[in-house]
Amino acid sequence: MAATGFASSLLGGRVSLHQSVRPSRAAFRAVPARAAAQVASTSGDAALGFKEMRKGIKEAADETVLTPRFYTTDFDEMEELFSLEKNPDLEMDEFDAMLSEFRTDYNQTHFVRNETFKKAADNITGPARKIFIEFLERSCTAEFSGFLLYKELGRRLKKTNPVVAEIFTLMSRDEARHAGFLNKAMSDFNLALDLGFLTKNRKYTFFRPQYIFYATYLSEKIGYWRYISIYRHLQRNPDNQLYPLFEYFENWCQDENRHGDFFSAILKSQPQFLDGWTSKLWSRFFCLSVYVTMYLNDHQRSAFYESLGLNTTQFNRHVIIETNKTTARIFPEVPDCETPEFWDHMEKLIVLNKKLIAIGQSDAPVVLKTLQRLPLLERFAAELMQLFIGKSLAAGADGVSSSAPIPCY
Ligand SMILES: [Fe+2]
Ligand SMILES: [Fe+2]
């Protein structure tokens, strides 16, 4: 999953997830001990300025409007939607086919580390080391967020729809692998996350099922396009391959693609979420929220993408345009991301965001900071509104079939 923090901040109240959700994978528990051992032998990371909960365990970054979030939903409504008793006509053929795909578990043996990881991490020093750790933390948190949500959905739907429930459980298996792999990568940098602690202590954002479907579909598909684009770029530019994690992205992104396809099947089975003008508005809103969140986040951390030899703006635009084309196959409406006006508003948001960050980092009194922020926030909201009322495309407007080959970035 990728982050949809911005959307959730506009929509979501925060509630506690059902208490039964706990990370069960031994990998999550094993990392801290190993990281603690490594920190004893490697030093110098204190200068990076990260706070530690205890030795080798990184304190999670502060939650902001743009950070990855944990999600929860109305599980009773979910049970209603998928109940075979209440919806005897629910189209199950596609779910049955998908379940057999997920059971095949194509990546069962993919996420195996080798001895090159630690050495590569040790060779990343100075500012690049800091941004690598931040990238890993954000990615790990986003993947773990998917694990928690899918695991709970698998548990809650077991009786009402065993097929859909098992798919959710198998997707949580995938996300557990992804999050565990990233957390082990963090331990290469001597700073792992305590995912059990995060599960219990992080705030959860509530979305109704319809919005969960939009948000998770987009998260999965944008995750797919991010991973495959980085992978293809590094294939063509092996000198920028600073750390072996990216070599795993080709198969990894296929997991995300399958997850996205599952949400596409869910939306098809629930046509009430694709029909009508409100669905169109929400579709456009979620697309824009996800695209704006990524664009601002990545431009705040352009040094990371540049360290891989990527141009942050080009990379982002490519990922957003491709995600939007993919999304247009299922969502009733998507924004038109290929107009100069669209990118003009996105660039203005970056400038405003930078100014807001600078105010936040200044030593000015709180009251003065608030006064300085107000006109910027007003302009920020105006730019968002311009994006929202900008040109949009109806579903299927790209004319690309779902089996189109993956273009190289
Ligand atoms: Fe994932
Ligand atoms: Fe995923």
Image (cartoon, grey):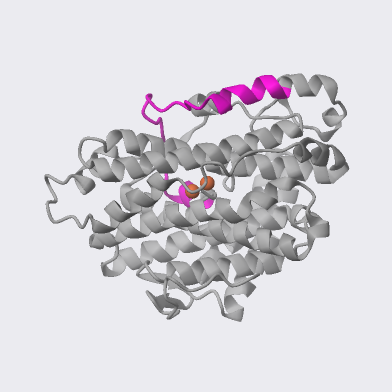
What segment is highlighted magenta in the picture? 6-35
Compared across the picture, whether 138 is left or right of 86 comes to right
Q: Is residue 26 left or right of residue 347?
A: left
Quarter where residue 232 is shown: bottom right
Left or right side of 360 for 12: left
Residue 355 showing in the rendered view:
no
Residue at 27% across / 52% down in the picture? 96
**Quadrant in which residue 337 is drawn:** bottom right
Relative height, residue 221 to residue 15 (above, below): below
Give coordinates of residue 63: x percent, y percent.
59, 38
Q: Residue at x 49, y 59 (%)?
A: 221
What is the quadrant of residue 170 in the picture? top left
Viewer-closest of 333 and 234: 234
Rendered location of residue 275, percent (x, y): 26, 67
> 377 left or right of 186?
left
Q: Is residue 18 magenta?
A: yes
Residue 158 locus on image (x, y percent):
26, 36
Q: Position of residue 71 (x, y in %)?
A: 44, 40
Q: How many marks?
A: 0
Q: Is residue 186 above or below residue 286?
A: above
- The answer to whether residue 118 is visible is yes
Q: Residue 113 in magenta?
A: no
Q: Is residue 270 above or below residue 191?
A: below
Q: Residue at x 37, y 61 (%)?
A: 282
* The C terminus, quarter of image: bottom right
